[in-house]
Image (cartoon, rainbow, N blue to C red):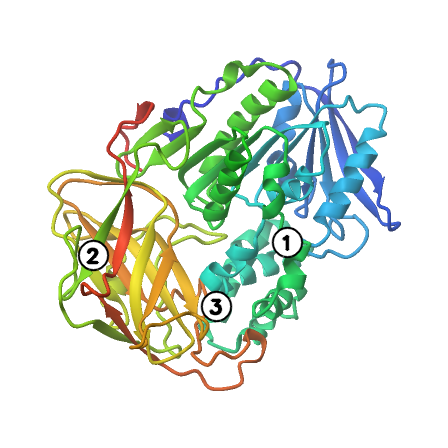
Amino acid sequence: MALLDRLPTPPLPPLRDPRYTVQRDVPVPMPDGVTLLADRYVPRGVRNPPTLLVRTPYGRRGPAALLNGLPFVPFGFQLVVQSARGTFGSGGEFDPLGSERDDGAATLRWLREQPWFGGSLGLYGASYLGYSAWALAAEGGPEVRAMALQVTASSFREAAYVGGSFALESTLTWTDLTHRQTTRLGMLTAPIVSRRRAVRAAASLRPLAELDVLTGGAPMRFYQDLLAAHADGADYWRSRDFSGTVGQADTPVTLLGGWYDVFLPWEIRDYLALRAAGHRPYLTIGPWWHADARHGLVAFREALAWFRAHLLNDPSGLRKHPVRLYVTGAREWRDYRDWPPPGMRQERWHLHKGGGLGPDGPQRHEPSAYRYDPADPTPALGGPTLLGSSKPVDNRPLERRPDVLVFTSPPLTSDLEVIGPVTADVHLRSSRAHTDLVVRLCDVDADGVSRNVCEGGLRLTPAHPADGDGVHRVTVDLWPAARRFRRGHRVRVHVTSGAYPKVAANPGTGDPLTSAARPAVPADQEVFHDPDHPSAIILPVVERPSEATIPDPAAE
């Protein structure tokens, strides 16, 4: 049984008419003289249908049309799909993230002047398409009456520099994808080969500045721009970060994400910004990753209900509670009034000498130690990635490495439900002023299989404060989670200094990423876990039942 069959998605309304007309290559002039191209899909037999706008760098035809909103058209919506500047026939040069606000605003002005535009507009899209919607949301005007966005965020800055480190694999993969997609059969092959090429290039351990050529055969501007902006990217990101204007979007918004998606922490930040501004957004998070095909149909059905409610005045498909979460391990969906779930409490589970972990207080022991060597960077098994599967995997091979500290609880005597933001409070002393800290939460089943639940990292610099003994108190934000640790399972925490190639190896020198001239140097790390330095993972524990529970008897 498919996950969609078990998720109570809104019922599909009857089709008005499956037929539609298409107007290809509609020119949309920009103020600087560049012309962008769009395709317009119009349902038959519908007078003044509301308009859905999608702006994309991934093409308008064939399979891309299905992902860009074509299935909405037979339900009474007209669709305008526009190719971003410099892609698929649109003029100008493709500057990733850089032109979306100005071009989007100009497109809205153009829409208002069209005789077929009825004054009611919805914005739709996943990933980059959703980012393009956020770019113009705050200035959309009264015509923008609904937004339905998936696996995306209003800013990709923190996703590019996770905890201050450089998101090497995702950045290389996406740059190669957009570089390759315009070649013959590129749209078919790029999603398959781009990640493989990126991982293979990273495995060479060549300098970061060379990896774009090693991946794609030529220098790639976006990759080099992100490398250069790592040290001080204020100017670069000033026109590319819309997180500060999310609360100004006076538009009903529904968001869909996945527990293993690369953008989840910042998608939830957008939700919280909307709530803080007094809005009532909807949020759905399932057991999905970024390129997971399973969330596509769920996203369509929830977006269709949202657009019908806010563009056609038919709220019959909306659920009662705005937040719906899939609890992994419990194999069920939960409905809540808000995020984090009401009734959540934070529990400190302390790290103990000898690899222990538990809610009992810290113990007086010597610190645990390991050496991190950037010439043999600690890998990541599983975890969020842009393309490919991010399904949780057995981390026992990683746990056998000497550069990974492992802390494990005794078997649980009752179920433990962790739903909400997860953080770690670690007291670290390093031989290097520049180093990384990575913390991972795992669920160990009765057979000893250790599956990753969530993780996070932080890059330390000399600016990070330390006490008189050189010990840093470090707060690491992990990915949010919704996990039932079943009775008899054990809770496990990794502490290490690498997750390669998901994030670039820290050379320990402090050199800029674009010109790491000095040889990389190992870092000797000490993790303290005594009463004066109570290192712990902070788990969001939920005991109060949700407003609604939808059981799922099948395995994940």
Amino acid tagged 1: Gly
Residue topped by disc 2: 350
Residue 325 sits in quarter: top left
Residue 213 sits in quarter: bottom right
Distance, label 1 to label 3, CA atoms, is 19 Å
Residue 339 visible, this angle: yes
Q: Which mark is residue 200?
A: 3
Amino acid tagged 2: His
Residue 83 sits in quarter: top right
Residue 318: horizontal and vertical position, in percent? 50, 19
In the displayed structure image, the side of residue 370 where residue 432 appears, left or right: right
**Residue at position x 65%, y 40% from top?**
133
In the displayed structure image, the side of residue 189 where residue 464 appears, left or right: left
| Closer mark to the observer between disc 2 and disc 1 | 2
Distance, label 2 to label 1, CA atoms, is 50 Å
Q: Sequence-wise, which precedes: disc 3 or disc 2?
A: 3
Residue 310: horizontal and vertical position, in percent? 61, 21
Residue topped by disc 1: 186
Distance, label 3 to label 2, CA atoms, is 38 Å
Q: Sequence-wise, which precedes: disc 1 or disc 3?
A: 1
User: Looking at the image, is 169 positioned above or below residue 268?
Assistant: below
Instruction: Determine the secondary structure under disc 3.
Output: helix
Q: Give neighbour class at mark 2: few <14, some 14-19, many 20+ (Cα, 10 Å).
A: many
